[in-house]
Image (tube, rainbow, N blue to C red):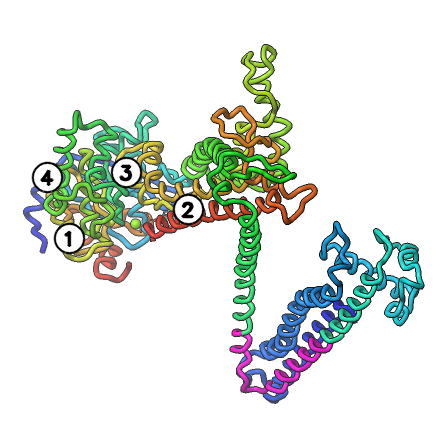
Amino acid sequence: MPTFWLVVFLFALAAFGYIAGRARALHSAGGNARDLHSLPAYYGYNVSLTALVPALLVLAIWLLAQPLLVETQVSRMIPTDAIPENSTLGLVMSDVRRVAEGLDIAVEQNALTETEAGSIRTEFTDLRGRLGELGVALGSDVRPEVLKAAQRYRVINSTGHLLMTLVVGALALGGLAFSYLRTNKDFRARNVVERGVLALLVLAASLAILTTIGIVLSMFFETINFFKLHSWTDFFFGGTWAPNFRGDSELSILPLLWGTLYISFIALLVAVPVGLFAAVYLSEYAGSHVRAIAKPLLEILAGIPTIVYGLFALLTVGPALVSIFGRGSEGLLGVEWMAGATSVLTAGLVMGIMLIPFVSSLSDDIINAVPQAMRDGSLGLGATKSETVKQVVLPAALPGIVGAVLLAASRAIGETMIVVMGAGAIAKFSLNPLESMTTITTRIVSQLTGDTDFASPETLVAFALGITLFVLTLGLNILALYIVRKYREQYE
Amino acid sequence: MYDLAKTESAVEQKDTKISARNVQVYYGDSHAIKDVDVDIEDKTVTAFIGPSGCGKSTFLRCLNRMNDTIDICRVKGDILLDGEDIYDPKVDPVQLRAKVGMVFQKPNPFPKSIYDNIAYGPRIHGLAKNKADLDEIVEKSLRRGAIWEEVKDRLDAPGTGLSGGQQQRLCIARAVATEPEVLLMDEPCSALDPIATAQVEELIDELRQNYSVVIVTHSMQQAARVSQKTAFFHLGNLVEYGETGQIFTNPVDPRTESYITGRIG
Ligand SMILES: Nc1ncnc2c1ncn2[C@@H]1O[C@H](COP(=O)(O)OP(=O)(O)O)[C@@H](O)[C@H]1O
Ligand SMILES: [Mg+2]
């Protein structure tokens, strides 16, 4: 039975369980719902949840675990000398999977019988040709070890699948029977369902946390691999970024960090004043009509995909800057300071525009949290609106605004698409904002795209860069949240 | 409790400070103040009493145009301060509020030092020529607010760190520092304990020497203790206005009597 039908069966069973559980509860109370401990529906939920949830969980875990187990089992069958010179176990295993898939398709289309598929030999059949007729293209002739492994792969897989169907089905039926039999008018179905719901919620929350931990750990292990191949002093303290795929690269984070921080700084220089002033206008001056239109409009900016901002940098802002600061006598200023469209300024300006709604909407919330009594006090003393904003509202909101700026900074540091398209690719220390520079995120992208070999330091450095970036932004976020929270307490 | 003869003779010679005629206030479509006429005298404490929601705060806020900060609020009629219409387009509401100060229900010190809280108004209005001058204003205002002795050693401490009663006296001192002519107080003691309340009441009595004070209060005892004149509001109407002693002992309107004896409220 394909997994799809198994899931359909589980849900049908759950629906049946609902009806049956509800009916049994009502029946035990002689049809009078008031004699039940809980509302009738709770008895139904109880039965259907006990049937459904454990079975679904086991199904999910099984589906995740089975491929891993099968892989290890099968890869043990491939002797080391069967791996060709310029290949790896991973590549051979992907051949195995392809052949196994091909056999599956062949059986499905009745080109082979199940027994034939299990016993076929490359010595006697042109398997590549026959699979090719069915639309499964193989890169090379199938070698006997690979075919044997593929056949074994299919066998283990189908036994696993059968076992899974049996276990999951039994679990569902068992859960149904168990909770159905427990159902009577005094059973506290409402409390049990409550606990079940709680367990589901906890599961969802822990899943989110576990994934985060998983991401960090996987990056961490690759980073350790990197530091086995490359000295950490060069990475953290060296001054040059010069990856060289023939080996002997200089891979130091400092020039990239410089570019990242410089671009982020320019972005904040744009975003913080504009965003803050926009927030002050919206929360202190704008009438309700203007606010109702302007606030959503500003927030639309926040929904634009960053790749669109990247295009804007590449096609509009970059060339515009060049026509001002470059082109010699043809340019607006008649200077030759800027050669290409990509530069720190291009990326910084566009990233600043991207961050405006972020800063303004956070600041708006924070300014609105300043109690109205504070403004009344100032206005009641004969202060004007702008005096009130400058001397009372902003100082009161300052810690929160600092928090917002730090959050914006951490977004700027982690931003990728705009810098990939607007900043350039040259790693260097320079103060000139009209030059191309590159950032940590851009280098991660470029080290991992194209032909990659996950054993070379030039590729693995991406993980070290990634985890440094992660630590940096995490630190900023924690600091920002700490400040914002502290500020909240002040007015509670 | 009421020293009638004395207050009456003291009140009679006072000039009118604020005179309101035919005042209507609307919040959107709802009519919150209806046809109010009232004369508030100089160097007198006037109490506004009445059940919740009857419009005491609304009317009080008309007197320094704080209602301007509420979008949907419209004020009609004439309110004259020393004979000048405060709703005249020529009048700058910001200047007006320096002359007609306000103390709010909840103490609202700014998140600044005690010194800066008091110096806020004088700085904005340029009342001090130099630092020594400002120091003097701060000290004088804190003394008037009856809080100088408690805070003189920690003028740099934040105003928000004081106790509720101290905060309210700080706010009164802050309002006094801009040298207003009229001081409006909207339930200034409702967040205070009895001891702090007694201190603030004593303070109000002293302020009467220099200012015209208008106080909104829910406590009839308080109105009787601190005020010379009392106005009773009910459902947006000014029902009765007169000498405090007369309102409390011998009200003319049956609604006033019911409120005072506790039958409406
Ligand atoms: N900002 C406002 N917006 C709309 N209606 C208001 C506002 N402030 C007060 N009101 C209404 O005006 C009436 C008088 O309120 P208020 O002056 O606060 O009464 P009081 O101070 O006597 O308790 C009430 O009905 C109240 O609901
Ligand atoms: Mg009120």
Q: CA distance from mark 4 to mark 2?
A: 51 Å
Residue B199 appears anywhere in the view: yes
In the image, residue A280 sits, relative to residue A88, either above or below, namely: above
- State which tag comes first along the sequence, 4 or 1: 4
**In what element is the residue under mark 2?**
helix
Report the residue marked by disc 4: B209
Report the residue marked by disc 3: A380
Q: Position of residue B37 (x, y in %)?
A: 27, 40
Q: Position of residue B164 (x, y in %)?
A: 22, 52
Chain part drawn in magenta: A166-195
Report the residue marked by disc 1: B224
Residue furthest toward the left? B6
In the image, residue A386 sits, relative to residue A140, either above or below, namely: above
| In the image, the residue with mark 2 has its CB under 8 Å from the nearest atom of ligand 1 | no
Q: Position of residue A95 (x, y in %)?
A: 79, 57
Q: Nearer the viewer, mark 4 or mark 1?
A: 4
Callout 2 amino acid: Ala
Residue at 31 percent across and 45 percent down: it is: A373
Callout 1 amino acid: Ala
- Callouts 4 and 2 close, C-beta under 8 Å: no
Q: CA distance from mark 4 to mark 1?
A: 18 Å
Query: For residue B2: magenta?
Result: no
- Callouts 4 and 3 close, C-beta under 8 Å: no
> Alpha-carbon neighbours of circle 3 within 10 Å: few (<14), some, or many (≥20)?
many
Residue at 56 percent across and 20 percent down: it is: A338
Report the residue marked by disc 2: A480
Q: Nearer the viewer, mark 4 or mark 2?
A: 2
Q: Nearer the viewer, mark 1 or mark 3?
A: 3
Q: Nearer the viewer, mark 2 or mark 3?
A: 2
- Asked if residue B21 lies left or right of residue B47, the reply is right
